[in-house]
Image: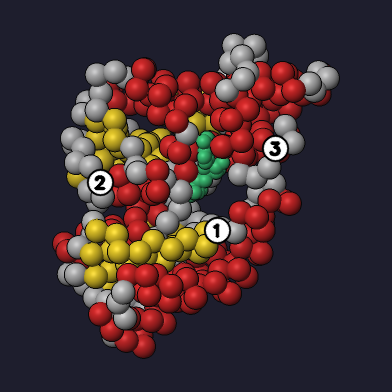
Amino acid sequence: MLTLGIESTCDETAASVVRDGKTILSNVIYSQIPIHRPYGGVFPEIASRHHVDKMLPVIDQALKEAGVTLKQIDLIAVAKGPGLIGSLLVGLNAAKGLSLATGIPFIGVNHIEAHLYATLMTSKPLFPALGVILSGGHTTLLKVEAPGRYQLIGQTVDDAIGEAFDKTAKMLSLPYPGGPEIERLAQTGNPNRFPFKAGQVKGSPYAFSFSGLKTAVKYTLEKLELTDPIRADIAASFQKAAFQDVIEKCKKAQEAYSLSSLIFGGGVTNSRTLRAAFASALPDTPLFFPDFALTLDNAAMIAGLGHEIYQSRKTGDPLDLSPETTQSLTPLT
Ligand code: KG4
Ligand code: ZN
């Protein structure tokens, strides 16, 4: 069964053809990073306009690279949210239009769940698992009973972790996206120089808060003369504080909910520093990370998850399916 995946939740226009939910025949990603770099983050209206320009060429290229025609596609899967409303509408309407014109069923999938599915495409984790999504838009812990069956444990109440990296990088005059830049700069810095701490949310032990951490960096920067060694120390101390917080909350959640393994997803899991920190903090827990090619936003994970859902549901979505801009799960108690 061939699935065409479409992704446009944020600033990547992506299309992919996946066979039987696992074999990636093409994975085309048009990244808008250079376009948004001057703004230090994603400019939503500009993102939507570029999706409009690139969506059909990217879909054509994905079909071409896979060596198939649209007629051979059995299912169209599209990210229906969460994400930027203008961006989401472009992908969703492309999927609906193609479905209407060809009669191929389409299915809308959750982008966060798809980040976890990226890892399931290449590994077989033990369930129930802790799903850990760390990206530019999300910081979410889920209890994953099985692929497609999950419940919310906690999420950020303000900035997402990747967003905190991007904003901190901007303060350090580093280009967007800031995560890889901070990781690089931190290699020469002292992570213990500044006692930064991520926030705790009263009454919600698994919720995240990174806006205070970002503000602490801002005040530190205002007090110091910015030399290269100090910038490196700030980057290292910030990175350590952000990752320590995630690790501690994951450890606590894993114990509290008796979870057998950790499944990671999202752009921040690109960080080798993060992967190493988790491995040393949880040496006895199986940790499953996505392939580096699937950490950032992509449509292969959307196609994979769409296939999986269609296998159990056997029917597509109606043409009036709405985009979902926010995460709509209620936390487990
Ligand atoms: O998953 P993704 O492509 O987009 C969203 O769904 O949001 O993640 C992009 C985010 C950016 O915020 C970027 O700075 C962060 O992932 N990122 C990193 C690293 N590589 C990418 N953050 C920390 N360390 C990294 N090495
Ligand atoms: Zn994402």
Q: Position of residue 62 (x, y in %)?
A: 39, 70
- Mark 1 neighbour class, 10 Å CA radius: few under 14, some 14 to 19, many 20 or more: some
Q: Which residue is mark 3?
A: 174
The residue furthest bottom is 101
Query: What SS does tag 3 mark?
Result: loop
Residue displayed at 34% across by 55% down = 301
**In the rendered structure, which amino acid carries the disc numbered 1?**
Ser
Q: Amino acid at mark 2?
A: Thr
Whole-percent x, y for residue 204 in the image: 44, 28
* Residue 319 appears anywhere in the view: yes
Position of 149 with respect to 156 (left or right) is left
Label pair 2/3, CB-CB below 8 angstroms: no
The dot on residue 122 is 2
In the picture of the structure, the residue carrying the numbered disc 1 is: 31
Q: x, y (%) of residue 216?
A: 69, 23
Q: Position of residue 307 (x, y in %)?
A: 24, 63
Residue 93 vertical position relative to residue 280 in the rendered view, above or below: below
In primary-sequence order, the first of circles 2 and 1 is 1
For marks 2 and 1, give the CA distance: 24 Å
> Relative to 119, does residue 50 appear above or below in the rendering?
below
**Viewer-proximal residue, 236 or 138?**
236
Q: How far is disc 2 from disc 3 in space, using C-alphas? A: 33 Å
Whether disc 1's CB lies below 8 Å from ligand 1 is answered: no
User: Quadrant of the rendered structure where residue 14 is?
Assistant: bottom left
**The N terminus: image quadrant:** bottom left
Tell me the distance, in whole angstroms, between the alpha carbons under discs 3 and 1: 19 Å
